[in-house]
Image (spheres, helix red, strand yellow):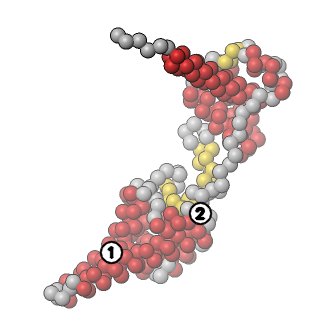
Amino acid sequence: MSSIITGEAVVLELRPASFAARALGLILDIIAQVVLAILLIILISAASSDLDDAAIRALVLSSVVFSLVIVPVTVETLTRGRSLGKLATGLRIVRDDGGSIRFRHAVIRGLLGFLEIYLTFGGLAIAVALFNDKSKRLGDIVAGTYSLRQRVPSQPRIMPVAPHYLASWVAMADIGRVPDATARRAGTFVQQAYLMAPASRISMATALASELAGYVAPPPPAGTIPEDYIGAVLGERRNRELARLRQAEQRNAAVGERLRRLPFTNG
């Protein structure tokens, strides 16, 4: 598993595809590309009665290049790293920073893929993939990409709650308008805290608690743990938002009921 830290200091955990998964996806892609090439060659043969040998060879070569290079590059570009084989195996090609690939990445992968997969019968691709931790083939190394597992079991969402010793304080606290960016960082921290190193976890919790404190009064009891403070504030903020939504729904329902009961009058 590889970790990427975003600009907001959020740790994203990305799981590179295994060698077996990549191999299966590649085999499916090769089958689809070869079948397409064979079909095009059959069509050329059926319609080549009036063509000379040089023209037929040119068309056959064009069909092979179209099927084995142009089509894979086009598909990966339009789908941002997907293909028939990758779709079947739950994989996607991404950049080394986790972002979607672009045309230049697909071109590099496609051109080098023709060399390492077809011209060497897959030997070069296998040899390179076996000796790096992300199962990259040569095209991935040059393009700066790798294959990412998309079908990763979802982790249960962690709901922020106030610990028992802060329940009475947070219930009476005045929680102001917390900026969306601050709330988002704090919420992400709650979800990702268990993945962080202890020192980083404490440091980030302290920083986020200090930032939230500017919008909450009065201060929490002495000795409050920063991570507990974050959970208490976010949990109470969520509960109050839900309560306001319920009250708004009840008011709207009451107004609607009164309107339905009004007698109709003719103007």
Q: Residue at x 68, y 48 (%)?
A: 155
Q: Residue at x 63, y 24 (%)?
A: 246
| Element at label 2 | loop
Q: Relative to 122, is 264 above or below?
A: above
Rounded to the nearest whole Å, what is the CA distance between mark 2 and mark 1?
Answer: 28 Å
Q: Percent position (x, y) of residue 208?
A: 67, 29
Q: Are marks 2 and 1 in contact (CB under 8 Å)?
A: no
Drawn side of residue 133 relative to residue 99, left or right: right
Mark 2 or mark 1: whose residue is earlier in sequence: 2
Q: Percent position (x, y) of residue 27?
A: 51, 75
User: Label 2, on which residue?
Assistant: 17
Q: Percent position (x, y) of residue 9?
A: 60, 38
Q: Percent position (x, y) of residue 166?
A: 80, 23
Which of 6/68 is in front? 68
Residue 35: which numbered mark, if any?
none
User: Is the C terminus in the top left, top right, bottom left or bottom right quadrant?
Assistant: top left
Which of 73/107 is in front? 73
The amino acid on which the numbered mark 1 sits, given as a three-letter code, is Val
Q: Residue at x 41, y 74 (%)?
A: 33
User: Is the N terminus in the top left, top right, bottom left or bottom right quadrant?
Assistant: bottom right
User: Label 1, on which residue?
Assistant: 65
Q: Relative to 5, is 52 above or below?
A: below
Q: Is residue 180 visible?
A: yes
Q: Quadrant of residue 17?
A: bottom right
Drawn side of residue 162 relative to residue 16, left or right: right
Q: Residues within 10 Å of mark 2 (few under 14, many from 20)?
A: many
Looking at the image, how many numbered discs can be counted on the residues? Answer: 2
